[in-house]
Amino acid sequence: MNADNPYQPPATNVDITANKSEDVWAFVEPQKMSAGRGLGWIADGFRFFGRDPGIWVVITIIYLIILMLSSLIPFATNILQPMLAGGLMIGVHQQDNGQPLEIKHLFDGFENAAGKLATLGALLIGLIILMYIGVAILGIAAAIIASIAEQKGNLSPIVIIITLIVGIPILSTALLVIMSVSWFGPPLVILHDLSVGEAFKMSLLGLKRNILPIIIFTFFFMLLFIAATVFTLTLGLLVIIPVMMGASYASWKDVFTRANVY
């Protein structure tokens, strides 16, 4: 048809390709968050709990029963905990995308990444053992130094002070490493399908880049935990544990994706 015909459809090809936005859930290398996000993660944890409080309480009761029973078998709790946490990361992710939390989410880790999550648990056992060995070596060295100083009549507070100056940073670093791997590891494995080695490496990098918010989170969460166990006869754990899971998810979302929580 003639190009001047007003009834002819436009001859120009118009691309109707969807302008796909970036996948905000895709894995990114650890991003640095502000120190205040440590408190923000706790607030996000409370928000996730508030969306399905009844289901969260039931899940937490089952979770605690499983951990109590598994404690009868050496190291079983350390293996099971990342598997249960991994499943709950899927559950919180569903919540975050407008879907309801379900009890079955507690066991999703067994279906989706059981081997890797169990290996992560074994890695955490190894780290804990190494920490205990380090503490024992430090204690033995301090005892030997103190014994020598006492025999020479030079036992002074300086020996104790030096031991504390050396020991506290080592112990604190070890605890932060273990915490970061148990914290970031399950969501990295189950939501990004990273290998255990990659999850370990990225957890440490996430710790390095976010040491301040992690310290602030740890301090205030421990205050909440103590209050929940002391003033509510441990009933507060039915809230604190879900908040901890929600906060773990929120920190993963902040640090390893571009889908900001806030």
Image: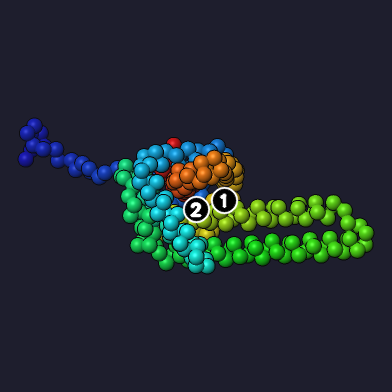
Q: Quarter holding the C terminus?
A: top left
Apparent side of residue 215 relative to residue 134 in the rendered image (left or right): left
Which residue of the protein is positioned furthest toward the front in this rendering? Answer: 233
Q: Quarter holding the N terminus?
A: top left
Which residue does the image show at 23% across and 43% down from the upper left?
15
182 lies above or below 52: below
245 lies above or below 142: above
The secondary structure type at the circle numbered 1 is helix
- The residue where tag 2 is placed is 184
The secondary structure type at the circle numbered 2 is helix
User: Which label was assigned to residue 207?
Assistant: 1
Q: Position of residue 116 (x, y in %)?
A: 44, 64
How packed is label 2: few (under 14 Cα within 10 Å), some, or many (20 or more)? many
In depth, the one of 71 and 249 nearer the eye is 71
Which residue does the image show at 45% across and 43% down from the upper left?
239
Residue type at mark 2: give it.
Phe
Q: Answer yes or no: do the residues labelled 2 and 1 have beta carbons within 8 Å?
A: yes
User: Which label was assigned to residue 116?
Assistant: none
How packed is label 1: few (under 14 Cα within 10 Å), some, or many (20 or more)? many
148 lies above or below 56: below
Q: Name the image quarter holding residue 108.
A: bottom left
Q: Which of the two labelled residues, at mark 2 and mark 1, occupies the earlier sequence position? A: 2
Q: Position of residue 220 (x, y in %)?
A: 57, 40
Q: Position of residue 223 (x, y in %)?
A: 58, 41
